[in-house]
Image (cartoon, rainbow, N blue to C red):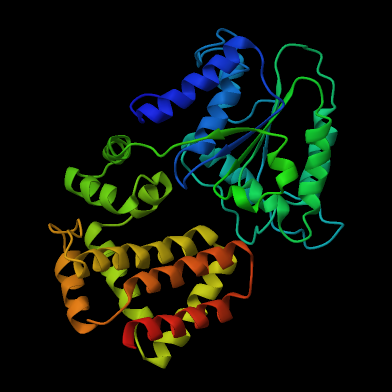
Amino acid sequence: MINDVSRAQIAIWDKLSNISVSKKIGSAYLFTGPIGSGKETLALKFSQLINCENSLKEICYECSSCIKFRALQHERLNIVVPLPTPKSASSDGIFPKEYFESIIAKSEDPFYKIAIPKANRILIQSIRDLKKKLYFKYEKDSGRNIVVIFDCELLCSGQGESGNALLKLLEEPPDRTTIILVTDHKKMLFETIISRCQNIDIPTLSNKYVYNWLIENNSSNSEAEFLVMICRANIHRARTLSRQPVEKLINQIEKLATTVVSKDSEKWRNFISHYSRLFGTNHLDFNHHLNLITIWMHGVNKLKQGLSSGYENTGLQPRMISFNKKFPKANIFEVILCIEDVKKHARQNLYMPLILLNMLIDIQKFVYE
């Protein structure tokens, strides 16, 4: 992860390494940056480094602490993620089996994105359990308690009770404890939380790193080149897109794009029904499919402006040219904004069937009028 990412990312790692060497480790950090820039991986690596038994500057990967951190099973590591609301107050624990499966998957693939079905917020019970655990006294004084909170903006969902509960921890953190919050959406956090954290801005990964990662994960050279073009340095997007053959992906992109501009009411009903269900069960896949439409529209818009689409050597280019001929007056920029609005509303957990219906109506206006 640390080698060959980008000069900007190497500079960030050097900064984190220097913090470890100085032994002036803060009680709270906020890792922010573009989606898919490897923030979660850096947060876990930093946690591993400051608990390494053999080095303050580099992870040794050999001591017992490093081995446990790599497996995400260290007794001092606490990973907090959004979870579904328990069915009843008497439910046995708050962790569904998908949580434990996701932790294993994350340990095997640092870029695996934990996304548990129907998990729309970070539960206040997670923060209450965390408080109890952090005040537990270990027989061994060495080491530092680490809390890593993924998708931490969801602390502030609903009434924000989880965010307020965490705020008390940030104001009076237990000894030898560091809390690392990780988010793609800093603006959704309470200002009181942001102000109590040292901010670490994570830049994007380099295209070269994403390309090499795809090659290492069994993509061909041509597939990797195509995926790098459309993933825009987002490693999560690259990971998702690489799961299917490129030709199937191209067909899926075109099908989604033509569906949202269609006037066929039956297609509308199927689209709204399918993606409302998908939103309720898998936010990542929901956003992934919206991103495919956006990829298409960005390419179409570039061609409309007489620019290179970037897809000249793929099956997308002729289809985009045909799309522009069919819809010469379409305001593609506004269509893209409609799709981005849906993604924004999705983070707010609003009523998705109505949101998707409004999106389709608005897209019709910008394509046909």
Residue 342 to residue 38: above or below? below
Residue 148 falls in image quadrant = top right
Residue sitting at x 65%, y 46%? 152
Q: Residue furthest front?
A: 305
| Left or right position of 251 against 136 | left
Task: Using the image as rendered, state which of residue 309 and residue 272 is in the foreground.
Answer: 309
Residue sitting at x 57%, y 50%? 185
Task: Using the image as rendered, state which of residue 38 and residue 199 is in the foreground.
Answer: 199
Residue sitting at x 21%, y 77%? 323
Q: How many marks?
A: 0
Q: Position of residue 74 (x, y in %)?
A: 65, 25
Q: Residue furthest top?
A: 54
Task: Using the image as rendered, state which of residue 262 and residue 249 is in the foreground.
Answer: 262
Residue 362 falls in image quadrant = bottom left
Q: Position of residue 201 (x, y in %)?
A: 52, 36
| Left or right position of 12 against 123 | left
Task: Using the image as rendered, state which of residue 163 and residue 192 is in the foreground.
Answer: 192
Residue 248 to residue 47: above or below? below
| Left or right position of 27 against 262 | right
Residue sitting at x 39%, y 47%? 234
Quarter of the picture holding the N terminus: top left
Quarter of the picture holding the C terminus: bottom left
- Res 187 seen here: yes
- Res 93 seen here: no
Q: Position of residue 328 (x, y in %)?
A: 22, 81
Residue 188 to residue 174: above or below? below
